[in-house]
Amino acid sequence: MRLELRFRRRAIRATGRVVALKPGGTLLRWVDYESWDVRYFPVVEFTTRQGRAVRATSSVGRRRGTPLPSHRIGSKIPIAYDPDDPTTVRWRPFYGSTLLALWGCLASGAVCVAAGIVFFFSVVTS
């Protein structure tokens, strides 16, 4: 998490053009837990603030057929890159999802603690 937060503080936003989709790691499907889906990572070309043309693969991928957003070859997507190493690229719609997931985990934990307290007091008072 510390590395992700460091990246976010330093990252520069840009728009990249998808030039390819690179198949990568696999994910176990939530539907049947028996088959695997391949993730695809967009290979993007963009220009840095200094005018340097860069081609890089995003470290964030998605399954083919996921409705949002589109990674069609030729489409433009918002990205964020490390100014010291422009080949370190994140696809920006997922850029903020880590924080959203963290808040979701905290909320789920709070609900579980509250349920535990209610259960504890119901057992103690009966």
Image: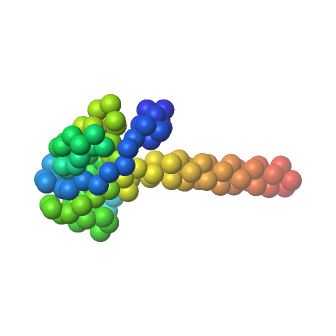
Quadrant, the C terminus: bottom right
Q: Position of residue 3 (x, y in %)?
A: 43, 32
> Relative to residue 47, is residue 68 drawn left or right?
right
Q: Which of the pair 104/36 is nearer the observer?
A: 104
Q: How many marks?
A: 0
Q: Is residue 8 visible?
A: yes
> Relative to residue 84, is residue 109 drawn left or right?
right
Would you place residue 89 above or below residue 126 in this image? above
Q: Which of the pair 75/108 is nearer the observer?
A: 75
Q: Residue at x 75, y 50 (%)?
A: 117
Q: Residue at x 37, y 49 (%)?
A: 13
Would you place residue 57 above or below residue 1 in this image? below
Q: Is residue 38 visible?
A: no
Q: Quadrant of residue 88?
A: top left
Q: Quadrant of residue 86?
A: top left
Q: Residue at x 25, y 65 (%)?
A: 70
Q: Residue at x 46, y 34 (%)?
A: 6
Residue furthest to the right? 125
Q: Which of the pair 126/9 is nearer the observer?
A: 9
Residue furthest to the bottom? 67
Q: Position of residue 16 (x, y in %)?
A: 24, 53
Q: Which of the pair 30/52 is nearer the observer?
A: 52
